[in-house]
Amino acid sequence: MKLILYSLLFAVSTFAHSSACDKYKVKQDYINHFDCVSELAESGYAPSQLILGVAYEFGEGVQQNLNMAKHYYGLACDKGHQKGCANYARLNEQSIK
């Protein structure tokens, strides 16, 4: 029961933090958006891992790095995020390591 409650609280706090990161994206403040989303990605939140993949692929708030993009897409894919899987496969087809 405690595990279920902890999981629910983590999901709610992660969603709230993710929404807080959106304010930077709306302002096109990619550096602060990247920093905010990085915290969530490192905690294993797949949607944020996908966002980091996009940031690295297109150089939004960070220097463009296709290898890092593929890495974060792969992490999101491992968590079952379909768009992460599609982006990982696309970069894999382009022979990105």
Image (spheres, grey):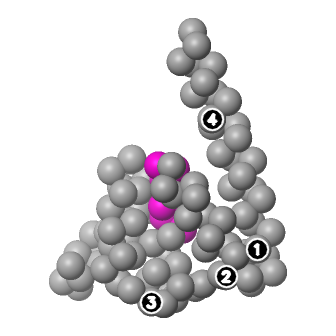
Which residue lies at the image location 33% right of the left edge and 73% below the top edge?
70
In the picture provided, is 24 more to the left or to the right than 8?
right
Q: Is residue 44 above or below residue 92?
A: above
Query: Does residue 85 appear in this view?
Result: no
Horizontal and vertical percent position of residue 32: 70, 76
Which residue lies at the image location 43% right of the left edge and 53% below the top edge?
81
Which SS class for mark 4? helix
Q: Are marks 3 and 2 in contact (CB under 8 Å)?
A: no
Which SS class for mark 3? loop
Inspect the magenta stretch and tell me whether residue 45 lies in it.
Answer: yes
Q: What stretch is highlighted in magenta?
A: 44-51
Looking at the image, is mark 1 or mark 2 earlier in the sequence? 1
- Name the residue beneath numbered marker 1: 24
Q: Do the residues labelled 4 and 3 touch (CB within 8 Å)?
A: no
* Tally of numbered tags: 4
Q: Which amino acid does label 3 sit on?
A: Gln
In the picture, the disc for residue 64 is: 3
The span from disc 4 to disc 3 (Cα, nearest Å) is 31 Å
Looking at the image, is mark 4 or mark 3 earlier in the sequence? 4
Q: In this view, does 29 lie above or below 87?
A: below
Q: In this view, does 1 lie above or below 61?
A: above
- Name the residue beneath numbered marker 4: 10
Quadrant that contains the N terminus: top right
- Name the residue beneath numbered marker 2: 30
| Residue placed most toward the observer, 93 or 10 | 10
